[in-house]
């Protein structure tokens, strides 16, 4: 069986076969960089709340917002997120998630509480940015670049809606 | 408007299904004039993504996006209605991409899906709806503009149609009347049309 690297994202999972450990790690970090760039950014706390964990696990929505109010967005400077380095020759699994309590709203996964409403502050990411990132080719492109070859169409599966733990 | 044609390509099956099930398809749940909100409705939206795919032969223009269909239905009756509606939507979408290319809004669109994600279901807490959603990545290309006022399709071929062997039987020509020829018949000009006639050898002189 091919050695597989699986990336579990909120509501989706994707995998690539037969890549080295260091490429797996870099791909996970690239995905999080994409999410930080594509996602909303106002104070920066949401972008800084992405984590990469080893294995297929859950990411708790435990971080409360700081409560600070800004009238303008902060300069874009998200913290890089390092993935745990895999070792050995077994298949690799990464779980990527965001720890903010309001993550479903920020990712437009909560059908009731939407970011898009009139007034201030303005939205800094387009509607459905997360699902568009996963489904409209950017995630696939990132995996292809990270693996530095035309990947055999990285498989993307599943969508289970809200991921917030209650 | 090529993007609109692609959007129409994916929305058409949703629209058709909504009509068949008597469910309004709308961008947002609006109140009817003098009325109340609908008890159930569908929304559909297409978010565009990348527009070129790198290949060894250079970049190919394709339109990638995320097509999302949401269903809001009445709470208290379980998820069966939502499951039925989403299953109909999924079937209609798959049928649409299976038989392509399509002539849509004057453009020949060829599209597919990267795989349905969902549907997922949840009763909403703050509104009286049961919510379901499914989405799919889409990949589509515009093959060309359909010529206006001329042939758009022939024998299931669409787009820039060219004649091919087998397109017509001889009887389908304008001045030929040979619907039921018998073996050995020949075509004879009767002053107006070519028509089938017994072979010369069989005719009596």
Image (cartoon, helix red, strand yellow):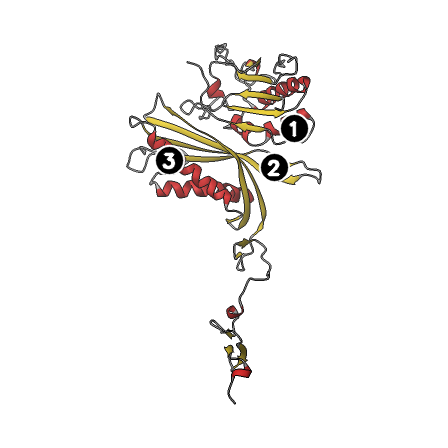
The crowd level at tag 1 (other Cα within 10 Å; few <14, some 14-19, many 20+) is some
The crowd level at tag 3 (other Cα within 10 Å; few <14, some 14-19, many 20+) is many
The crowd level at tag 2 (other Cα within 10 Å; few <14, some 14-19, many 20+) is some
| Residue occupying the point 57% across, 29% down | A155
Q: Nearer the viewer, mark 1 or mark 2?
A: 1
Name the quadrant containing residue B124: top left
Callouts 3 and 2 in the same chain: yes
Q: Which residue is mark 2?
A: B51
Q: Nearer the viewer, mark 3 or mark 2?
A: 3
Residue B58: horizontal and vertical position, in percent? 70, 39
Q: Which residue is mark 3?
A: B85
Residue A125: horizontal and vertical position, in percent? 54, 25
Q: Which residue is mark 1?
A: A144
Mark 1 residue element: helix
Mark 3 residue element: helix
Chain letter for mark 3: B
Location of residue B88 with respect to A123 vertically, above or below: below
């Amino acid at each position: 069986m091919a050695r597989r690297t699986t990336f579990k994202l909120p509501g989706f999972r994707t995998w690539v076969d037969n890549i080295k450990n260091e490429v797996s790690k870099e791909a996970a970090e690239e995905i999080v960089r994409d999410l930080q760039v594509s996602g909303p950014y106002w104070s920066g706390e949401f972008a800084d709340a992405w984590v990469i964990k080893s294995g297929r696990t859950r990411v708790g929505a435990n971080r409360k917002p700081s409560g600070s109010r800004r009238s303008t967005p902060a300069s874009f400077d998200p913290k890089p997120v390092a993935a745990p380095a895999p070792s050995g020759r077994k298949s690799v699994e990464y779980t990527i998630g965001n720890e903010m309590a309001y993550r479903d709203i920020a990712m437009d996964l909560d059908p009731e509480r939407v970011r898009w409403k009139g007034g201030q502050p303005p939205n800094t990411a387009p509607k459905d940015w997360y699902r568009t990132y996963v489904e409209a080719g950017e995630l696939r492109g990132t995996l292809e670049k990270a693996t530095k070859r035309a990947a055999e169409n990285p498989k993307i599966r599943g969508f289970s809606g809200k991921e917030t733990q209650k | 408007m090529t993007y609109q044609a692609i959007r129409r390509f994916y929305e058409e099956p949703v629209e058709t299904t909504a009509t068949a099930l008597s469910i309004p398809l709308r961008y947002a749940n609006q109140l009817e004039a003098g009325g109340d909100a609908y008890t159930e409705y569908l929304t559909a939206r297409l978010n565009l993504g990348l527009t070129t795919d790198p290949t060894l032969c250079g970049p190919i223009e394709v339109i990638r996006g995320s097509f999302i269909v949401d269903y809001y239905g009445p709470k208290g009756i379980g998820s069966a209605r939502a499951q039925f509606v989403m299953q109909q939507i999924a079937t209609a979408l798959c049928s649409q991409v299976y038989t392509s290319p399509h002539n849509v809004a004057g453009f020949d669109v060829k599209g597919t899906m990267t795989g349905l994600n969902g549907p997922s279901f949840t009763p909403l807490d703050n509104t009286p709806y049961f919510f379901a959603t499914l989405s799919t990545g889409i990949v589509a290309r515009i093959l060309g503009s359909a010529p206006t006022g001329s042939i758009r399709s022939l024998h299931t071929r669409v787009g820039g149609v060219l004649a091919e062997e087998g397109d017509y039987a001889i009887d389908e020509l304008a001045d030929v009347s040979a619907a039921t020829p018998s073996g050995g018949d020949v075509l004879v000009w009767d002053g107006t049309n070519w028509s089938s006639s017994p072979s010369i050898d069989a005719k009596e002189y």
